[in-house]
C-alpha cells in the first residue's frame, strides 16, 4: 500500500467522523472507521493514487455543506460554507470527472428549506467554474507542452517545460481563485485586512 494514499485514507476517515459528529451520530469515530471494512476502500487506498485525493475533497465538501446547514440552523450566514464546499467540489471534479454527479445532489436541498436555494446555486456555480478553469488550464498547458517538446529539439528545454508549464497552470489557477474570492468580498462591501 502506498503511504500517501493510506495517509489520505486516514484524512478521509477523519473528515467523515467530523461530518458524523455534526449530524450528532453516536460514536462518530467508530462509524467512520467502518469505512475500512468496505473492499473498495482498500482498492482506492492501495492502488488508486488519483482516486484518494478526490475522496478526501468530496468528504471535505460534505463537511462544509453540513457546516453550512448548521450555520443556517443558528441563523448565521451559510454562504461562506457553501462557497468553500463549491471550491472543494470543483477540485474533486477536476480530479475525477465522475464526481460531477455530486454537484447535482445538493440542488435537492432547497426542497427541504427554501433558504438554501441561493447558497446551493452558488456552490454549483463555483464547482462548475473551478472544474472549467482546471480543464481549460490543463488543456492549455498540455498544448504548450506539446508545442515545446515537438518544436524545440532540446532535451533541457523539454524537461524545463514539463515542470514549468503544469506549475505555471497551477499558479494561474490559484491566482484566479483568489481574485474571484476577493471580488466576492468587495461586492459585499467587505474590506481586506485584519
Image (tube, grey):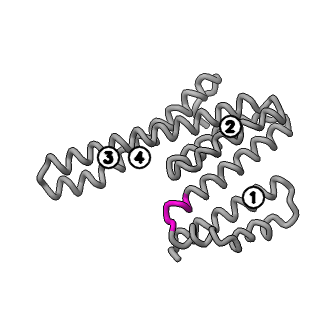
Q: Residue at x 35, y 49 (%)?
A: 166
Q: Secondary structure at mark 2?
A: helix
Q: Which residues are magenta?
A: 48-53
Mark found first going from the N terminus, 3 or 2: 2
Q: Earlier in the sequence, mark 2 or mark 1?
A: 1
What's the residue at 36%, 42% (across, down)?
139
In terms of sequence position, does the residue under pointer 4 or pointer 1 come before the other? Answer: 1
State which tag comes first along the sequence, 4 or 2: 2
Image quadrant in which you'd find residue 181: top right
Between 103 and 137, the one nearer to me in the picture: 103
Q: Tell whether label 2 touches label 4 (CB within 8 Å).
A: no
Tag in front: 4 or 3: 3
Secondary structure of residue under mark 4: helix
Mark 2 = which residue? 80
Q: Nearer the viewer, residue 42 or 83?
A: 42
Specify which label sits upstream in the sequence, 4 or 3.
3
Q: Nearer the viewer, mark 3 or mark 2?
A: 3
Residue 142 circle label: 3
Residue 18, numbered circle: 1
**Disc 2 to disc 1, how far (Cα)?**
18 Å
Q: Which residue is mark 4?
A: 170
Q: Is residue 52 magenta?
A: yes
**Above/below status of 113 relative to 162:** above
In the rendered view, tell whether residue 108 sits above or below residue 189.
Answer: below
Amino acid at each position: 500500500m502506498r503511504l500517501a494514499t493510506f495517509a489520505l485514507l486516514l484524512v478521509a476517515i477523519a473528515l467523515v467522523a467530523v461530518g458524523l459528529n455534526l449530524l450528532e451520530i453516536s460514536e462518530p469515530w467508530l462509524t467512520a472507521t467502518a469505512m475500512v471494512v468496505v473492499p473498495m476502500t482498500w482498492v482506492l487506498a492501495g492502488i488508486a493514487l488519483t482516486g484518494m485525493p478526490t475522496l478526501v475533497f468530496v468528504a471535505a465538501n460534505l463537511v462544509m455543506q453540513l457546516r453550512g446547514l448548521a450555520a443556517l440552523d443558528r441563523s448565521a450566514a451559510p454562504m461562506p460554507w457553501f462557497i468553500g464546499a463549491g471550491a472543494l467540489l470543483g477540485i474533486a471534479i477536476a480530479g475525477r470527472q465522475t464526481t460531477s454527479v455530486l454537484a447535482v445532489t445538493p440542488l435537492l436541498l432547497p426542497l427541504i428549506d427554501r433558504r438554501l436555494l441561493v447558497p446551493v446555486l452558488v456552490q454549483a456555480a463555483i464547482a462548475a467554474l473551478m472544474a472549467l478553469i482546471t480543464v481549460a488550464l490543463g488543456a492549455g498547458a498540455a498544448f504548450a507542452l506539446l508545442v515545446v517538446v515537438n518544436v524545440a529539439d532540446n532535451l533541457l528545454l523539454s524537461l524545463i517545460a514539463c515542470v514549468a508549464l503544469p506549475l505555471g497552470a497551477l499558479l494561474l489557477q490559484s491566482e484566479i481563485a483568489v481574485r474571484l474570492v476577493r471580488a466576492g468580498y468587495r461586492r459585499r462591501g467587505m474590506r481586506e485586512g485584519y
